[in-house]
Image (cartoon, rainbow, N blue to C red):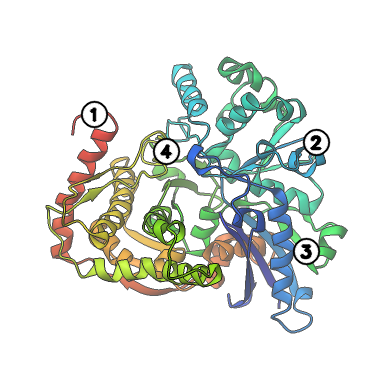
Amino acid sequence: MSYALGLDFGSDSVRALLVDTTNGAELATHVVYYPRWSKGLYCDPVSSQFRQHPLDYTESLIEAVNGLWSQLPAGAAEKVCGLCFDTTGSTPIAIDEQGVALALKPEFAENPNAMFVLWKDHCAIKEAQEITAAANANDINYLKYEGGIYSSEWFWAKALYVLRQDKRVRDAAYAWVEHCDWMTALLTGTNHPDKLIAGRCAAGHKVMWHESWGGYPPNDFFVGIDPLLDGLRDRLPKETRTADTVCGKLTDEWAEKLGLSTDVVVSFSAFDCHAGAIGANVKPGVLTKVMGTSTCDITIASYEDIGDRCIKGICGQVDGSVMPGMIGLEAGQSAFGDLYAWFKNVLCWPLKNVATSTIVDEATKAKLVEEIEGQILRQLGDAASQLPISVNDIVALDWVNGRRTPDADQSVAMAISGLNMGSQAPQIFKALVEATAFGAKAIIDRFVEEGVAINQVVTIGGISKKSDFVMQTCADVWNCPIDVLESEQSCALGAAIYAATAAGVFPSVHVAQEVMASKVVKTYQPNAENAEIYQSLYQGYIKLGQFVDGGEA
Protein backbone atom coordinates (compact mmCIF):
# COMPACT_ATOMS: atom_id res chain seq x y z
CA MET A 1 0.00 0.00 0.00
CA SER A 2 1.24 3.49 -0.86
CA TYR A 3 -0.09 7.03 -0.67
CA ALA A 4 0.36 9.97 -3.05
CA LEU A 5 0.32 13.59 -1.92
CA GLY A 6 -1.17 16.33 -4.09
CA LEU A 7 -0.49 19.96 -3.17
CA ASP A 8 -2.76 22.52 -4.81
CA PHE A 9 -1.78 26.20 -4.45
CA GLY A 10 -4.79 28.36 -5.31
CA SER A 11 -5.28 32.11 -5.22
CA ASP A 12 -6.19 32.23 -1.52
CA SER A 13 -4.94 28.99 0.02
CA VAL A 14 -3.04 25.75 -0.30
CA ARG A 15 -4.82 22.39 -0.17
CA ALA A 16 -2.99 19.20 0.76
CA LEU A 17 -4.66 15.94 -0.26
CA LEU A 18 -3.51 12.43 0.59
CA VAL A 19 -4.75 9.67 -1.74
CA ASP A 20 -4.53 5.89 -1.48
CA THR A 21 -3.00 4.72 -4.77
CA THR A 22 -4.62 1.27 -4.51
CA ASN A 23 -8.19 2.52 -4.82
CA GLY A 24 -8.19 6.31 -5.18
CA ALA A 25 -9.68 6.89 -1.73
CA GLU A 26 -9.10 10.43 -0.48
CA LEU A 27 -7.77 9.78 3.01
CA ALA A 28 -7.38 13.31 4.34
CA THR A 29 -7.27 16.91 3.22
CA HIS A 30 -6.15 20.07 4.95
CA VAL A 31 -6.60 23.66 3.75
CA VAL A 32 -4.51 26.60 4.94
CA TYR A 33 -5.14 30.23 3.94
CA TYR A 34 -2.17 32.45 3.16
CA PRO A 35 -1.80 34.79 6.16
CA ARG A 36 -0.34 37.84 4.38
CA TRP A 37 -2.69 37.52 1.42
CA SER A 38 -5.66 37.29 3.79
CA LYS A 39 -4.72 40.73 5.13
CA GLY A 40 -4.55 42.21 1.63
CA LEU A 41 -0.83 42.91 1.91
CA TYR A 42 1.21 43.90 -1.16
CA CYS A 43 -1.93 44.26 -3.30
CA ASP A 44 -3.64 47.26 -4.88
CA PRO A 45 -6.82 46.16 -6.67
CA VAL A 46 -7.38 49.65 -8.11
CA SER A 47 -4.19 49.34 -10.15
CA SER A 48 -4.66 45.57 -10.71
CA GLN A 49 -1.59 44.78 -8.58
CA PHE A 50 -1.77 41.36 -6.89
CA ARG A 51 1.41 40.05 -5.30
CA GLN A 52 2.08 37.14 -2.94
CA HIS A 53 4.99 36.66 -0.57
CA PRO A 54 6.90 33.36 -0.91
CA LEU A 55 6.64 32.88 2.85
CA ASP A 56 2.87 32.61 2.41
CA TYR A 57 3.55 29.55 0.28
CA THR A 58 6.24 27.87 2.37
CA GLU A 59 4.66 28.48 5.76
CA SER A 60 1.23 27.37 4.54
CA LEU A 61 2.74 24.28 2.90
CA ILE A 62 4.30 23.13 6.16
CA GLU A 63 1.08 23.71 8.07
CA ALA A 64 -1.10 22.01 5.45
CA VAL A 65 0.99 18.83 5.18
CA ASN A 66 1.44 18.45 8.92
CA GLY A 67 -2.30 19.02 9.28
CA LEU A 68 -2.80 15.75 7.41
CA TRP A 69 -0.80 13.71 9.89
CA SER A 70 -2.90 14.98 12.80
CA GLN A 71 -5.98 13.45 11.12
CA LEU A 72 -4.49 10.02 10.38
CA PRO A 73 -3.17 7.03 12.30
CA ALA A 74 0.52 6.94 13.15
CA GLY A 75 2.66 5.73 10.27
CA ALA A 76 0.59 7.29 7.48
CA ALA A 77 3.44 9.59 6.44
CA GLU A 78 5.73 6.60 5.99
CA LYS A 79 3.50 5.28 3.20
CA VAL A 80 3.86 8.39 1.01
CA CYS A 81 5.66 7.45 -2.20
CA GLY A 82 5.50 10.75 -4.04
CA LEU A 83 4.21 14.29 -4.12
CA CYS A 84 3.42 16.84 -6.81
CA PHE A 85 2.59 20.54 -6.85
CA ASP A 86 0.08 22.42 -8.91
CA THR A 87 -0.23 26.19 -8.69
CA THR A 88 -1.89 29.19 -10.25
CA GLY A 89 -0.14 30.63 -13.26
CA SER A 90 1.40 32.52 -14.70
CA THR A 91 2.77 33.49 -11.28
CA PRO A 92 6.51 34.24 -11.65
CA ILE A 93 9.13 35.66 -9.25
CA ALA A 94 12.60 37.10 -9.66
CA ILE A 95 15.52 35.04 -8.30
CA ASP A 96 19.18 35.86 -7.71
CA GLU A 97 22.22 34.01 -9.07
CA GLN A 98 21.89 31.36 -6.37
CA GLY A 99 18.22 30.76 -7.11
CA VAL A 100 16.94 32.58 -4.01
CA ALA A 101 13.62 34.37 -4.45
CA LEU A 102 14.35 38.07 -3.96
CA ALA A 103 11.52 38.54 -1.45
CA LEU A 104 13.26 36.07 0.86
CA LYS A 105 16.23 38.41 1.14
CA PRO A 106 16.06 41.04 3.93
CA GLU A 107 16.49 43.99 1.61
CA PHE A 108 13.45 42.95 -0.47
CA ALA A 109 11.25 41.45 2.24
CA GLU A 110 8.56 44.15 1.91
CA ASN A 111 8.96 45.01 -1.78
CA PRO A 112 5.94 43.84 -3.83
CA ASN A 113 8.03 43.87 -7.01
CA ALA A 114 10.29 41.21 -5.49
CA MET A 115 7.35 38.89 -4.80
CA PHE A 116 5.35 36.45 -6.86
CA VAL A 117 3.26 38.31 -9.42
CA LEU A 118 -0.04 36.47 -9.12
CA TRP A 119 -1.87 35.29 -12.22
CA LYS A 120 -4.56 37.96 -11.78
CA ASP A 121 -2.08 40.85 -11.69
CA HIS A 122 -2.76 42.92 -14.81
CA CYS A 123 -0.20 45.68 -14.42
CA ALA A 124 1.61 44.54 -17.57
CA ILE A 125 -1.03 45.28 -20.22
CA LYS A 126 1.33 47.59 -22.15
CA GLU A 127 4.13 45.03 -22.07
CA ALA A 128 1.82 42.26 -23.29
CA GLN A 129 0.69 44.41 -26.21
CA GLU A 130 4.32 45.09 -27.16
CA ILE A 131 5.15 41.37 -27.10
CA THR A 132 2.11 40.60 -29.26
CA ALA A 133 3.04 43.30 -31.77
CA ALA A 134 6.64 42.07 -31.98
CA ALA A 135 5.55 38.48 -32.55
CA ASN A 136 3.08 39.45 -35.25
CA ALA A 137 5.74 41.50 -37.04
CA ASN A 138 8.34 38.73 -36.89
CA ASP A 139 9.05 36.25 -39.69
CA ILE A 140 8.25 33.48 -37.21
CA ASN A 141 5.27 34.25 -35.01
CA TYR A 142 6.43 32.95 -31.66
CA LEU A 143 2.89 33.21 -30.33
CA LYS A 144 1.27 30.89 -32.85
CA TYR A 145 1.14 28.07 -30.30
CA GLU A 146 -0.14 30.39 -27.55
CA GLY A 147 -3.30 31.59 -29.25
CA GLY A 148 -1.66 34.46 -31.17
CA ILE A 149 -2.04 37.05 -28.39
CA TYR A 150 0.23 37.45 -25.37
CA SER A 151 -1.51 38.24 -22.09
CA SER A 152 -0.64 40.56 -19.23
CA GLU A 153 -1.28 37.51 -17.02
CA TRP A 154 1.81 35.77 -18.43
CA PHE A 155 5.50 35.43 -17.65
CA TRP A 156 7.37 37.72 -20.06
CA ALA A 157 4.97 40.66 -19.73
CA LYS A 158 5.15 40.54 -15.93
CA ALA A 159 8.93 40.21 -15.82
CA LEU A 160 9.37 43.14 -18.21
CA TYR A 161 6.92 45.30 -16.27
CA VAL A 162 8.80 44.78 -13.01
CA LEU A 163 12.19 45.29 -14.65
CA ARG A 164 10.98 48.61 -16.02
CA GLN A 165 9.40 49.72 -12.76
CA ASP A 166 12.01 48.81 -10.14
CA LYS A 167 15.75 49.39 -10.58
CA ARG A 168 16.65 47.64 -7.32
CA VAL A 169 14.87 44.50 -8.41
CA ARG A 170 16.27 44.83 -11.92
CA ASP A 171 19.83 44.99 -10.60
CA ALA A 172 19.35 42.03 -8.26
CA ALA A 173 17.33 39.73 -10.55
CA TYR A 174 19.32 37.04 -12.34
CA ALA A 175 16.34 35.12 -13.71
CA TRP A 176 12.63 34.50 -13.17
CA VAL A 177 10.82 31.31 -12.30
CA GLU A 178 7.18 30.21 -12.19
CA HIS A 179 5.63 29.41 -8.82
CA CYS A 180 5.00 25.74 -9.70
CA ASP A 181 8.62 25.23 -10.79
CA TRP A 182 9.97 27.13 -7.78
CA MET A 183 8.14 24.87 -5.32
CA THR A 184 9.41 21.69 -6.96
CA ALA A 185 12.99 22.95 -7.13
CA LEU A 186 12.93 24.23 -3.55
CA LEU A 187 11.93 20.87 -2.08
CA THR A 188 14.44 18.90 -4.14
CA GLY A 189 17.38 21.27 -3.75
CA THR A 190 17.51 21.99 -7.49
CA ASN A 191 16.64 25.69 -7.28
CA HIS A 192 20.09 26.94 -8.36
CA PRO A 193 19.74 28.24 -11.94
CA ASP A 194 22.37 25.74 -13.11
CA LYS A 195 20.23 22.85 -11.84
CA LEU A 196 16.74 24.19 -12.49
CA ILE A 197 14.55 22.32 -15.00
CA ALA A 198 11.18 23.76 -15.94
CA GLY A 199 7.87 21.96 -16.02
CA ARG A 200 6.52 21.59 -19.56
CA CYS A 201 3.15 23.02 -18.57
CA ALA A 202 4.29 26.48 -17.45
CA ALA A 203 7.06 26.80 -20.03
CA GLY A 204 4.84 25.89 -22.96
CA HIS A 205 1.71 27.82 -22.07
CA LYS A 206 3.17 31.01 -20.60
CA VAL A 207 6.92 31.30 -21.33
CA MET A 208 6.79 30.80 -25.12
CA TRP A 209 8.80 27.56 -25.03
CA HIS A 210 8.36 25.31 -28.04
CA GLU A 211 10.46 22.49 -29.37
CA SER A 212 10.21 23.66 -32.98
CA TRP A 213 12.34 26.75 -32.31
CA GLY A 214 14.71 25.09 -29.90
CA GLY A 215 13.10 26.23 -26.68
CA TYR A 216 12.42 29.94 -26.17
CA PRO A 217 12.45 32.56 -28.94
CA PRO A 218 15.96 33.88 -29.70
CA ASN A 219 17.53 36.64 -27.64
CA ASP A 220 17.27 39.13 -30.52
CA PHE A 221 13.49 38.84 -30.44
CA PHE A 222 13.35 39.90 -26.80
CA VAL A 223 16.00 42.62 -27.15
CA GLY A 224 13.90 44.08 -29.97
CA ILE A 225 11.05 44.49 -27.47
CA ASP A 226 13.25 45.98 -24.74
CA PRO A 227 17.02 45.70 -24.08
CA LEU A 228 16.16 45.04 -20.42
CA LEU A 229 15.32 41.48 -21.52
CA ASP A 230 18.79 40.95 -22.98
CA GLY A 231 20.12 37.53 -21.97
CA LEU A 232 17.18 36.51 -19.78
CA ARG A 233 16.08 33.68 -22.07
CA ASP A 234 19.58 32.19 -21.83
CA ARG A 235 19.35 32.12 -18.04
CA LEU A 236 16.09 30.17 -18.08
CA PRO A 237 16.02 26.36 -17.89
CA LYS A 238 16.81 24.87 -21.27
CA GLU A 239 15.04 21.60 -20.55
CA THR A 240 11.37 20.97 -19.76
CA ARG A 241 9.68 17.91 -18.27
CA THR A 242 6.12 16.64 -18.03
CA ALA A 243 4.52 16.32 -14.60
CA ASP A 244 4.62 12.52 -14.56
CA THR A 245 8.43 12.48 -14.39
CA VAL A 246 10.78 12.68 -11.43
CA CYS A 247 12.46 15.96 -10.47
CA GLY A 248 14.20 14.51 -7.41
CA LYS A 249 13.61 13.48 -3.82
CA LEU A 250 12.91 15.54 -0.74
CA THR A 251 15.92 17.21 0.83
CA ASP A 252 16.73 16.45 4.46
CA GLU A 253 15.49 19.90 5.45
CA TRP A 254 12.11 19.60 3.73
CA ALA A 255 11.56 15.99 4.72
CA GLU A 256 11.88 17.06 8.35
CA LYS A 257 9.61 20.08 7.91
CA LEU A 258 6.89 18.00 6.28
CA GLY A 259 7.20 14.91 8.44
CA LEU A 260 8.14 12.79 5.43
CA SER A 261 11.00 10.54 4.32
CA THR A 262 13.83 11.60 2.04
CA ASP A 263 12.76 8.65 -0.14
CA VAL A 264 9.65 10.55 -1.24
CA VAL A 265 9.74 11.28 -4.97
CA VAL A 266 8.89 14.83 -6.10
CA SER A 267 7.56 15.01 -9.65
CA PHE A 268 7.71 18.00 -11.93
CA SER A 269 4.78 20.36 -11.59
CA ALA A 270 1.85 21.78 -13.53
CA PHE A 271 -0.72 24.54 -13.31
CA ASP A 272 -3.79 23.91 -11.17
CA CYS A 273 -6.28 23.61 -14.01
CA HIS A 274 -4.15 21.13 -15.94
CA ALA A 275 -3.82 18.92 -12.87
CA GLY A 276 -7.55 19.36 -12.27
CA ALA A 277 -8.29 18.01 -15.73
CA ILE A 278 -6.24 14.92 -14.91
CA GLY A 279 -8.20 14.48 -11.68
CA ALA A 280 -11.38 14.80 -13.75
CA ASN A 281 -10.33 12.02 -16.14
CA VAL A 282 -9.96 14.34 -19.14
CA LYS A 283 -10.24 12.80 -22.61
CA PRO A 284 -10.33 14.10 -26.19
CA GLY A 285 -13.69 15.74 -26.84
CA VAL A 286 -14.26 16.40 -23.13
CA LEU A 287 -13.84 19.96 -21.86
CA THR A 288 -12.89 20.17 -18.19
CA LYS A 289 -13.91 23.50 -16.70
CA VAL A 290 -12.29 24.46 -13.39
CA MET A 291 -14.75 26.92 -11.85
CA GLY A 292 -13.39 29.14 -9.11
CA THR A 293 -12.45 32.81 -8.79
CA SER A 294 -11.60 32.58 -12.47
CA THR A 295 -12.02 29.60 -14.78
CA CYS A 296 -9.64 27.49 -16.73
CA ASP A 297 -10.91 25.30 -19.55
CA ILE A 298 -8.81 22.29 -20.48
CA THR A 299 -9.09 19.61 -23.11
CA ILE A 300 -6.64 17.36 -24.92
CA ALA A 301 -6.27 16.20 -28.49
CA SER A 302 -4.12 13.73 -30.36
CA TYR A 303 -1.23 14.80 -32.56
CA GLU A 304 -3.22 13.54 -35.56
CA ASP A 305 -6.30 15.61 -34.70
CA ILE A 306 -4.35 18.84 -34.26
CA GLY A 307 -1.81 18.33 -37.02
CA ASP A 308 -0.21 21.63 -38.03
CA ARG A 309 -3.17 23.76 -36.97
CA CYS A 310 -2.68 26.58 -34.46
CA ILE A 311 -5.83 27.28 -32.42
CA LYS A 312 -6.52 31.02 -32.37
CA GLY A 313 -7.32 33.05 -29.30
CA ILE A 314 -6.69 30.45 -26.58
CA CYS A 315 -3.99 30.13 -23.89
CA GLY A 316 -1.85 27.70 -25.78
CA GLN A 317 -1.47 24.21 -27.16
CA VAL A 318 1.40 22.32 -25.58
CA ASP A 319 2.66 18.79 -26.06
CA GLY A 320 2.32 16.95 -22.75
CA SER A 321 1.17 19.89 -20.64
CA VAL A 322 -1.84 17.91 -19.40
CA MET A 323 -1.53 14.30 -20.55
CA PRO A 324 1.86 13.04 -21.73
CA GLY A 325 1.60 11.97 -25.37
CA MET A 326 -1.28 14.36 -26.11
CA ILE A 327 -1.61 18.05 -26.95
CA GLY A 328 -2.97 20.06 -24.02
CA LEU A 329 -5.32 22.91 -24.94
CA GLU A 330 -6.06 25.72 -22.47
CA ALA A 331 -8.57 28.56 -22.38
CA GLY A 332 -10.44 30.30 -19.57
CA GLN A 333 -12.14 33.37 -18.11
CA SER A 334 -10.36 36.01 -16.03
CA ALA A 335 -13.32 36.26 -13.67
CA PHE A 336 -16.06 33.84 -12.74
CA GLY A 337 -16.57 33.65 -8.98
CA ASP A 338 -14.67 36.94 -8.76
CA LEU A 339 -17.55 38.62 -10.62
CA TYR A 340 -20.03 37.38 -8.04
CA ALA A 341 -17.68 38.42 -5.22
CA TRP A 342 -17.39 41.90 -6.73
CA PHE A 343 -21.18 42.29 -6.71
CA LYS A 344 -21.39 40.99 -3.15
CA ASN A 345 -18.80 43.57 -2.06
CA VAL A 346 -20.76 46.35 -3.78
CA LEU A 347 -23.91 45.36 -1.92
CA CYS A 348 -22.07 45.02 1.39
CA TRP A 349 -20.36 48.42 1.26
CA PRO A 350 -22.98 50.19 3.41
CA LEU A 351 -22.82 47.42 6.01
CA LYS A 352 -19.09 47.86 6.39
CA ASN A 353 -18.75 51.61 6.01
CA VAL A 354 -21.92 53.40 7.09
CA ALA A 355 -22.00 54.22 10.81
CA THR A 356 -25.09 53.09 12.69
CA SER A 357 -26.56 54.40 15.91
CA THR A 358 -28.09 51.07 16.88
CA ILE A 359 -24.88 49.02 16.74
CA VAL A 360 -22.09 50.72 18.65
CA ASP A 361 -20.17 47.57 19.50
CA GLU A 362 -17.66 46.94 16.70
CA ALA A 363 -17.46 43.23 17.50
CA THR A 364 -21.24 42.93 17.16
CA LYS A 365 -21.20 44.85 13.91
CA ALA A 366 -18.38 42.70 12.52
CA LYS A 367 -20.27 39.52 13.41
CA LEU A 368 -23.42 40.83 11.71
CA VAL A 369 -21.50 41.77 8.55
CA GLU A 370 -19.86 38.34 8.47
CA GLU A 371 -23.23 36.62 8.84
CA ILE A 372 -24.83 38.63 6.03
CA GLU A 373 -21.81 38.21 3.74
CA GLY A 374 -21.98 34.48 4.26
CA GLN A 375 -25.59 34.32 3.11
CA ILE A 376 -25.89 37.00 0.45
CA LEU A 377 -24.84 35.05 -2.66
CA ARG A 378 -26.95 32.04 -1.71
CA GLN A 379 -29.98 34.26 -1.11
CA LEU A 380 -29.40 36.10 -4.38
CA GLY A 381 -29.12 32.79 -6.21
CA ASP A 382 -32.35 31.53 -4.68
CA ALA A 383 -34.18 34.71 -5.67
CA ALA A 384 -32.66 34.84 -9.16
CA SER A 385 -33.58 31.22 -9.83
CA GLN A 386 -37.27 32.15 -9.42
CA LEU A 387 -37.15 34.89 -12.05
CA PRO A 388 -38.55 34.26 -15.52
CA ILE A 389 -36.15 34.29 -18.49
CA SER A 390 -36.95 36.72 -21.28
CA VAL A 391 -35.22 37.96 -24.41
CA ASN A 392 -35.61 41.47 -22.92
CA ASP A 393 -33.63 40.70 -19.75
CA ILE A 394 -30.57 42.60 -18.55
CA VAL A 395 -27.40 41.59 -20.41
CA ALA A 396 -23.93 41.89 -18.88
CA LEU A 397 -20.33 41.13 -19.81
CA ASP A 398 -18.09 39.02 -17.58
CA TRP A 399 -14.97 41.13 -18.26
CA VAL A 400 -14.69 42.69 -14.78
CA ASN A 401 -11.04 41.52 -14.72
CA GLY A 402 -10.41 41.72 -18.44
CA ARG A 403 -10.82 38.92 -20.98
CA ARG A 404 -8.56 35.90 -20.93
CA THR A 405 -10.10 34.03 -23.87
CA PRO A 406 -11.17 33.96 -26.55
CA ASP A 407 -8.66 36.58 -27.76
CA ALA A 408 -6.89 37.84 -24.64
CA ASP A 409 -7.39 41.51 -23.82
CA GLN A 410 -7.01 42.59 -20.22
CA SER A 411 -7.79 46.21 -21.08
CA VAL A 412 -11.48 45.60 -21.79
CA ALA A 413 -14.04 46.32 -19.11
CA MET A 414 -17.30 44.91 -17.90
CA ALA A 415 -20.61 46.45 -18.98
CA ILE A 416 -24.30 46.03 -18.19
CA SER A 417 -27.17 46.95 -20.49
CA GLY A 418 -30.92 47.01 -20.03
CA LEU A 419 -31.13 48.37 -16.48
CA ASN A 420 -34.30 50.19 -15.47
CA MET A 421 -36.11 51.30 -12.32
CA GLY A 422 -37.35 47.76 -11.78
CA SER A 423 -33.86 46.27 -11.79
CA GLN A 424 -33.22 44.96 -8.30
CA ALA A 425 -30.31 42.98 -6.90
CA PRO A 426 -31.65 39.52 -7.93
CA GLN A 427 -32.20 40.68 -11.53
CA ILE A 428 -28.70 42.08 -11.74
CA PHE A 429 -27.18 38.97 -10.13
CA LYS A 430 -29.06 36.78 -12.62
CA ALA A 431 -27.51 38.81 -15.46
CA LEU A 432 -24.02 38.42 -13.96
CA VAL A 433 -24.39 34.65 -13.68
CA GLU A 434 -25.62 34.53 -17.26
CA ALA A 435 -22.63 36.66 -18.30
CA THR A 436 -20.19 34.12 -16.89
CA ALA A 437 -22.10 31.36 -18.68
CA PHE A 438 -22.02 33.35 -21.94
CA GLY A 439 -18.28 33.90 -21.57
CA ALA A 440 -17.82 30.16 -21.19
CA LYS A 441 -20.00 29.53 -24.27
CA ALA A 442 -17.77 31.85 -26.30
CA ILE A 443 -14.82 29.62 -25.40
CA ILE A 444 -16.67 26.44 -26.36
CA ASP A 445 -17.74 28.01 -29.64
CA ARG A 446 -14.16 29.05 -30.42
CA PHE A 447 -12.85 25.53 -29.90
CA VAL A 448 -15.55 24.14 -32.18
CA GLU A 449 -14.95 26.83 -34.82
CA GLU A 450 -11.26 25.91 -34.82
CA GLY A 451 -12.00 22.25 -35.36
CA VAL A 452 -11.57 20.95 -31.79
CA ALA A 453 -14.41 18.63 -30.87
CA ILE A 454 -16.23 19.41 -27.59
CA ASN A 455 -18.82 16.71 -26.95
CA GLN A 456 -19.07 16.87 -23.17
CA VAL A 457 -18.39 19.32 -20.33
CA VAL A 458 -17.12 18.25 -16.91
CA THR A 459 -16.89 20.82 -14.12
CA ILE A 460 -14.77 20.92 -11.00
CA GLY A 461 -14.11 23.55 -8.37
CA GLY A 462 -16.11 25.10 -5.56
CA ILE A 463 -18.83 26.74 -7.62
CA SER A 464 -19.76 23.49 -9.34
CA LYS A 465 -20.60 21.96 -5.96
CA LYS A 466 -22.18 24.98 -4.27
CA SER A 467 -24.68 26.56 -6.63
CA ASP A 468 -27.48 24.71 -8.43
CA PHE A 469 -28.57 28.03 -9.92
CA VAL A 470 -25.20 28.75 -11.53
CA MET A 471 -24.82 25.21 -12.84
CA GLN A 472 -28.33 25.00 -14.27
CA THR A 473 -27.86 28.37 -15.96
CA CYS A 474 -24.65 27.08 -17.54
CA ALA A 475 -26.36 23.89 -18.76
CA ASP A 476 -29.14 25.98 -20.34
CA VAL A 477 -26.75 28.50 -21.93
CA TRP A 478 -24.36 25.86 -23.24
CA ASN A 479 -27.32 23.64 -24.18
CA CYS A 480 -25.53 20.49 -23.10
CA PRO A 481 -25.36 18.21 -20.05
CA ILE A 482 -22.79 19.11 -17.39
CA ASP A 483 -21.19 16.49 -15.16
CA VAL A 484 -20.06 17.48 -11.67
CA LEU A 485 -17.36 15.40 -10.02
CA GLU A 486 -17.30 13.94 -6.54
CA SER A 487 -13.91 15.18 -5.39
CA GLU A 488 -13.79 18.49 -3.54
CA GLN A 489 -10.10 18.77 -4.44
CA SER A 490 -9.82 17.71 -8.08
CA CYS A 491 -6.70 19.79 -8.76
CA ALA A 492 -4.87 18.28 -5.79
CA LEU A 493 -6.17 14.86 -6.89
CA GLY A 494 -4.67 15.37 -10.34
CA ALA A 495 -1.36 16.32 -8.73
CA ALA A 496 -1.52 13.12 -6.67
CA ILE A 497 -2.08 11.13 -9.89
CA TYR A 498 1.04 12.71 -11.41
CA ALA A 499 2.97 11.92 -8.22
CA ALA A 500 1.88 8.27 -8.17
CA THR A 501 2.92 7.87 -11.80
CA ALA A 502 6.30 9.51 -11.23
CA ALA A 503 6.88 7.27 -8.21
CA GLY A 504 6.41 4.21 -10.41
CA VAL A 505 3.12 3.00 -8.90
CA PHE A 506 1.52 3.18 -12.35
CA PRO A 507 3.10 2.88 -15.80
CA SER A 508 1.26 5.94 -17.14
CA VAL A 509 -1.04 8.77 -16.14
CA HIS A 510 -3.87 7.14 -18.07
CA VAL A 511 -3.58 3.91 -16.07
CA ALA A 512 -3.39 5.91 -12.82
CA GLN A 513 -6.58 7.76 -13.77
CA GLU A 514 -8.47 4.48 -14.08
CA VAL A 515 -7.85 3.89 -10.38
CA MET A 516 -7.62 7.37 -8.87
CA ALA A 517 -9.65 9.86 -10.96
CA SER A 518 -12.84 11.34 -9.51
CA LYS A 519 -16.30 9.98 -10.26
CA VAL A 520 -19.40 11.87 -11.47
CA VAL A 521 -21.89 12.61 -8.67
CA LYS A 522 -24.40 14.85 -10.44
CA THR A 523 -25.44 15.80 -13.96
CA TYR A 524 -27.30 18.97 -14.96
CA GLN A 525 -29.52 18.62 -18.03
CA PRO A 526 -30.40 21.67 -20.16
CA ASN A 527 -33.94 23.01 -20.21
CA ALA A 528 -34.87 23.19 -23.91
CA GLU A 529 -37.19 26.20 -23.50
CA ASN A 530 -34.59 28.18 -21.55
CA ALA A 531 -31.84 27.19 -23.98
CA GLU A 532 -33.78 28.72 -26.87
CA ILE A 533 -34.24 32.03 -25.06
CA TYR A 534 -30.59 32.07 -24.06
CA GLN A 535 -29.57 31.83 -27.72
CA SER A 536 -31.15 35.27 -28.20
CA LEU A 537 -29.66 36.69 -25.00
CA TYR A 538 -26.26 35.35 -26.05
CA GLN A 539 -26.45 37.40 -29.24
CA GLY A 540 -27.03 40.43 -27.01
CA TYR A 541 -23.89 39.46 -25.07
CA ILE A 542 -21.90 39.27 -28.34
CA LYS A 543 -23.18 42.67 -29.50
CA LEU A 544 -22.43 44.29 -26.14
CA GLY A 545 -18.93 42.86 -26.27
CA GLN A 546 -18.39 44.25 -29.76
CA PHE A 547 -19.48 47.67 -28.55
CA VAL A 548 -17.13 47.62 -25.55
CA ASP A 549 -14.33 46.36 -27.82
CA GLY A 550 -14.79 49.44 -29.98
CA GLY A 551 -16.79 47.87 -32.77
CA GLU A 552 -20.37 48.37 -33.80
CA ALA A 553 -23.07 47.00 -31.52
Give the residue type at disc 3.
Val
* Sequence-first disc among 3 and 2: 2
Q: Residue at 51% of width from left, 67% of height from top?
A: 366
The residue identified by callout 4 is 307
At label 4, which amino acid type do we have? Gly
Report the residue marked by disc 2. Answer: 194
Q: Badge 2: few (under 14), some or many (20 or more) residues near its Cα, within 10 Å? A: some
Please tell me in which quadrant of the rendered image residue 222 appears. top right
Badge 3 crowding class, 10 Å Cα cut-off, few under 14, some 14 to 19, many 20 or more, is many
Amino acid tagged 1: Gly
Q: Which quadrant of the figure contains the N terminus? A: bottom right
Nearer the observer, 70 or 210: 70
Give me the disc on residue 264: 3
Q: CA distance from mark 2 to mark 4?
A: 35 Å
Where 129 falls versus 308 (above or below)?
above
Residue 252, quarter of the rendered image: bottom right
SS assignment at label 4: loop
Amino acid type at circle 2 is Asp
Q: Looking at the image, is mark 4 or mark 3 earlier in the sequence?
A: 3
